[in-house]
Amino acid sequence: MSVKQDLFQSPDYFLVDELLTEEQKLIRDTVRAYVKKEISPIIEEYAQRSEFPQQIVGQLGELGCFGPTVPTEYGGGGLDYTSYGLMMQELERGDSGVRSTASVQGSLVMFPIYKYGDEAQRKKYLPRLASGEWLGCFGLTEPNHGSDPSSMTTHFTDAGDYVVLNGAKMWISNAPYAQVAVVWAKDEAGVVHGLIVEQGMEGFSAPTTHNKWSLRASATGELVFDHVKVPKENILPNVTGMRGPLSCLTKARYGIAWGVLGAAMDCYDTALRYSKERVQFGKPIASFQLQQKKLAEMLTEITKAQLLNWRLGSLMDDGRATPQQVSMAKRNSCEIATEICREARQMLGGMGITGEYPIMRHMMNLESVITYEGTHDIHLLITGMDITGINAFK
């Protein structure tokens, strides 16, 4: 068994496929085939080298993975949220970094331009982002402000036809290769606005973040603004305050809830196949009770998450899903995926840490995913506040 040959078979113990439309299944299977053909054969080498496979940007655009829920008139897919979730599931089954590239582009860059931009901004940016001609990034987290983004210090001042932007953002996916950044900053009154900052604007730089043990095949960087002149027509006109960036994060967290399930499925599938092939004490290790316990519990958690995600997708499509429900799903999926990765690694013994199998790469990636776009603990407190009515953040 080699990483070059992708033998993945998706678990579906409760026949969740019967809840999907034919179009949804076709979309999922198309992305699954892409991952098997283009991602699985190369991703291990890129991760080992800590290099971003730039060719995937055009491929993901062509596949329709950028902004699948954005209307077709702007280059998006005009698809439902369940289809979007299934796409993210399949991409992260390949690698979390690949899914991050698509999540950021669709939920954190295209969504705010579509939702909060004007018609000129939509027409200028969305088709190029949808096709993969341009890559985008999202600037919210700062060196000193992660879980508390409202305390951001990045700010801008009015200078007539333009504003002057100063500050820095960090842990920004896609940053080193992005032509466009949607940046959240405070005006002189301390009100948060979204600004579209373009590569090449004087004083704007995006240095690469090095020495990562996680998301090694994903491009991560900083955004540095040193008296950057941003035209006023680049300010998103239809939102102010933290509602803007937080609504983007809700959309991205929804994609993560589906995405990490793909990583969990990949680890389960790998461990199941390995346990049937690996012989110890004269028989396959799948015949031992402890290994069956591990596999049965993995599949149980995957099945529960599949049903939770499917229901959340239905609520999103109906416009009834709450940010708090999305938080619960993101946290649940990250927790079960991380645990499944660790159990699968143990089942493979020493082979589990090698690049011959995807498990260790998934495990390292998930250490980032369980933290970004709302940490594990923060999402727990979001649920706690929702059910008690008491804010434990302050």
Image (spheres, rainbow, N blue to C red):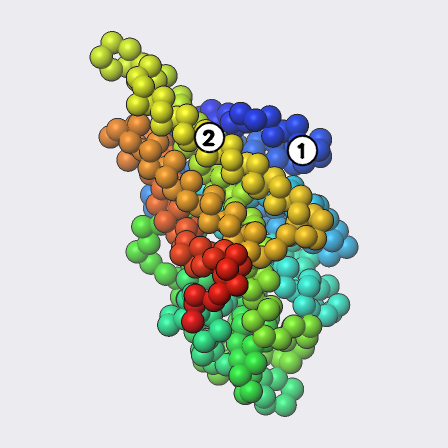
42 relative position to 355: left or right: right
Name of the residue lying farthest toward the front: 388
389 relative position to 206: left or right: right
Q: Residue 279's image quarter?
A: top left
| Circle number at residue 327 | none
Q: Residues within 10 Å of mark 2 (few under 14, many from 20)?
A: some
| Image position of 377 with respect to 311: above or below | below
Q: Nearer the viewer, residue 151 or 160?
A: 151
Give percent across and percent down for residue 2: 38, 26
Name of the residue lying farthest toward the bottom: 160
Q: Amino acid at mark 2?
A: Thr
Q: Label 1: which residue?
A: 20
User: Could you tell me which quadrant the N terminus lies in?
Assistant: top left
118 relative position to 89: left or right: right
Residue 57 seen from this side: no
Give percent across and percent down for residue 11: 51, 27
The residue located at (73%, 57%) in the rendering is 74
Q: Nearer the viewer, residue 77 or 56?
A: 77
Q: Secondary structure at mark 2?
A: helix
Give percent across and percent down for residue 195: 59, 73
Q: Nearer the viewer, residue 237 or 380?
A: 380
Q: Nearer the viewer, residue 161 or 293?
A: 293
Q: Amino acid at mark 1?
A: Leu
Q: Real-space Cα distance between discs 1 and 2?
A: 20 Å
| Circle number at residue 300 | 2
| Image position of 48 with respect to 386: above or below | above
Camera-near label (1 vs 2) is 2
User: Could you tell me which quadrant the C terminus lies in?
Assistant: bottom left
43 relative position to 303: left or right: left
The residue located at (54%, 87%) in the rendering is 188
The residue located at (45%, 38%) in the rendering is 263
| Image position of 208 with respect to 365: above or below | below
